[in-house]
Image (spheres, rainbow, N blue to C red):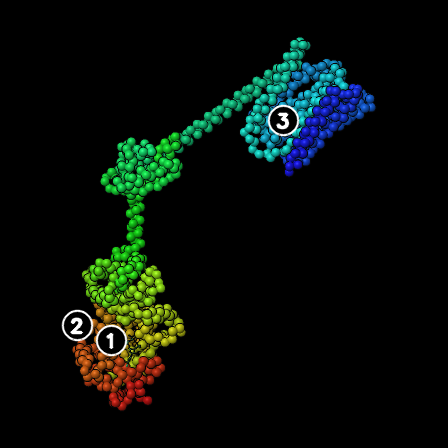
Amino acid sequence: MKSAACRPTLLVSAIATAVFVWTALLLFSPGSKGTAAVASNVGLIVAAAVGASACYMRSRRGGPQRRSWLLLGSGALSWGLGACAWTAYETLGRQAPIPSWADVGYLGAVPLLAAGLLTLPGTPVRWPARVRLLLDGALIAAALLAISWVLVLGPLINNGKDGLVQVFALAYPLGDIVCGSLAVVSLARAPHQAQVPLRTLLLVCLGLLSFSVGDTGFALLTLRDTYQSGQLIGLGWCGGWALLAVAALQPSGAPSEPSGENLRHRAWMSTSAPYVPLLAMVGILGVWRSTHGALGRIVVLDLLLMLLLVVVRHVLTQRENDQLTSSLEARVLDRTEALSGWEQWWKALVQNSTDIVTVVRADGTVRYQTPSVQSVFGYDAQDLLETDIADVFLEPDRHRLRQCLAAAALAPGEPLTFSGGVRHADGSDCATESTVMSLLHEDAVQGLVINTRDISERMQLESELNHRAFHDELSGLANRALFRDRLIHALNQRDRVGLAIGVLFIDLDRFKEVNDTLGHAYGDELLVVIARRLTELVRPGDSVARLGGDEFAVLLEHLTTPDEAQFVADRLVEVIAQPVHVREVDVRVRASIGITIAEIDDAELADLDAPDSADVMLRNGDIAMYRAKSAGGGACEWYRPELHTALLRRVEIEKQLRNALTDDELSLVYQPTASVATGIFTGVEALVRWDSRVLGKVLPNEFIPVAEDTGLIIDLGAWVLHHACVQAAVWLRNGVRADFTLAVNVSGLQLLSSGMVDTVRSALTLSGLPAENLLLEMTESVLLERTDQTLARLHELKRLGIRLAIDDFGTGYSSLSYLSRFPVDVLKVDRSFIAQLQQESSNERELTRTIIQLGGSLAMLTVAEGVETPEQLASLRALGCDLAQGYLFSEPRPPDEIEPMLARADDAPAAALPSAAALPPAALPPAAHPT
Ligand code: C2E
Ligand code: CA
Ligand code: CA
């Protein structure tokens, strides 16, 4: 790299030294003139050869200048060959003829050199500038022509030679004019030839000028017949080729953006170069005029031509300038307009913005205030001028604002934020947020810029959202997230306070039904009432939350004994159960409550941190509540670890139950009902069975409540109704007695579901079972909820012609007053009464008697459930009960086992029942079935 860089420098030095030595040799040639001539000739050939070689080398470097260097090198080569021919003539001692091979070489150099110069790369010049450049070239050429005319051309033309000799004689100076003019024009074009390094360009042009001067000198001397090889005039050519060689050896230089300095030099060269030939012309013509007198016609014409060119050029330049000025003016005008537009725009923006922009001095006095302060804070912008900005802020924030201003002043250009309260002109307080930035150093501003906006609405919204995030919108109570937070907090405090913490998990029973039947708006109002009752009941330190839907929770802090939690829970059950009067309707809801407490040395929570403990407590409360609910609701239940397993089972049942219907896992069994008096089977009760592929056999007592909670009971009930009716119709067709009764159980949700009546109607129609053969059983509790609606539904069903029964009578509210209001045909006495019939001490017997009598007085058939022993049957007969059902007669069995037991229409009444002592219950044969 280093050697490559220093090689050109070495070569340049070598060339300079050679030229120097050669010049010295010519000046002080030791021997004869012949020696000087040989030295001169050889030197010139060598110089041309060096020039040509350097140019060729340069062209081999490639790039956009490649062609130019090839042409320039060829020019040098052509000239060198001419010089060889000349030397040959001289060496042979012969006068070179005209034209000779030497002329061909010399003159051939001119077009090649000219072409080399013209093809140097430059930016394309557009119309006016191009014409101007042409005019400049013509001017330069005219100046050089004038010089050449008086020195060479004129005398040559006048020397009387003619023909070919004259033509060749004139060709030399004309070629020199062309070369010289082009060199000067090239220099004048320097600013447009940024791709050619300035120094290279200068060297090439000087080389060509040197060549032209040498050539002209040669022509001059030849004209006077004083030329001899070895004269100093040869330095023109030698210097020309040397300069060309040095130019070619210059580093190509990346065509980068020319520097400012470089541009200035180029501009300077461009303007001064044309003057050189003009000055030379003036000087030479001046000397000529004084020594030779008149300048001659041609020179005068030439001068006139130059004058014309100058005028044309001037006019052209003037026009160009005018155009430039007017376009410049137009642009300035456009720009000014645009700027004033911007200014207006900015003004409008600042003044109409809801942001308030204030410019204050370092001490806080207002220098500028946007009018927006009027609409936002009610102040007149003018009134604020020269007052302390801190004054509009609230007292507690003023000091902080001053500190902020001082800090901003110390950090110019850096925005600081500040939030504080501003006193509105109407006296109210506004929350604001400001950005303060120091532009004290900016001449246009010279102040601290405060950008203020009113964020009161945003703050209010934020706090509302915050409240929303942690509160239940409907009841205003804390929500689950806040409750959990409070529980965590309490758990953290627990160790310090040394007291237990209790969580009551409350869920309203059958709230979904209230929602479904009375509407959501009603349900919402009910929830609000319950929420109020809860809040009123707990101690001030305890929290109540609505966890979602009909789920509430109470956090009991500082419990001294677990009994306190029990006490509160009992009170809650009681209070919630009191009728709620909403929109003229009385509704009774009950609640199931799960209780869980965290004691100081709680083993389950020992290894857990507060958040995990909180989650465990919430889960445990939930499990206990579930337990309370599945046990019938309206009660509370303590959490015990075993409940967890029960819950998991329940969850699993729920999951599997969804598939039971579609996967055909359900079936029906039938349990006969017999006449107490005769023992004849009068009908059957359909009971559903579930044989789950995953869980095995699941009892109705386990899955029916789940089906009720999940709403699946509606589909399940419809399925039972349909299949049971189809089965009963088959039995009827097969000849069982016409008053045969099919009893089907109906749940509360199912009864009130909108499709209930249609379901029953279509079950009857599709199966062909007469309506009077169907008996629907529903429990007391079902009848007692939402009595009006239920009553309406019962009447609708009755209109279909079916009969209705009250199931499990005696286990519910035991309020008998309502009985007469319902269109019920059958009363089924719960088996808990029957089980105790035999115990002499109990008053169940009396109660059972009353129930049976009551049924009788209301014209209802009475059915005793769960009759297991002949003694029970005997007692029932004594009490006057109509029908009985129980293991004494038959367990629930599949239809094919039941059919043979059913009494035929043509059957004679059974004579007698087996005596109570004679048979064990399970082995009792079907009483009315003739084998
Ligand atoms: P339930 O309506 O009171 O039905 C009578 C229940 O008592 C049946 O239990 C039956 O097997 C049982 N049982 C019958 N005789 C005796 C006896 O002598 N001693 C004893 N200890 N029990 C006897 P199961 O089938 O387990 O049904 C339980 C409950 O499930 C039913 O009570 C009924 O409330 C409900 N259930 C059954 N099938 C359906 C149905 O299709 N729809 C609806 N909604 N509920 C149903
Ligand atoms: Ca039943
Ligand atoms: Ca029952």
Q: Of label 1 and label 3, which has the lower sequence position?
A: 3
- Distance from disc 2 to disc 1, alpha carbons, whole Å, reads 17 Å
Type of residue at label 3? Answer: Leu
Judge from the rendering whether residue 87 lies leftward or rightward of residue 210; answer left or right.
right
Q: Of label 3 and label 2, which has the lower sequence position?
A: 3
Residue 245 x %, y %: 68, 29
Type of residue at label 2? Answer: Ser
Work out whether 877 lies above or below 803: below
Looking at the rendering, in which quadrant would you find the N terminus? top right
Residue shown at 45% from the left, 27% from the top: 332
Which SS class for mark 2? helix
Near mark 3 (Cα within 10 A), the count class, few <14, some 14-19 or many ≥20, is: many
Look at mark 2 in the image and give the residue it sits on: 817
Type of residue at label 1? Answer: Asp
Look at mark 3 in the image and give the residue it sits on: 202
What numbered label is drawn on residue 808?
A: 1
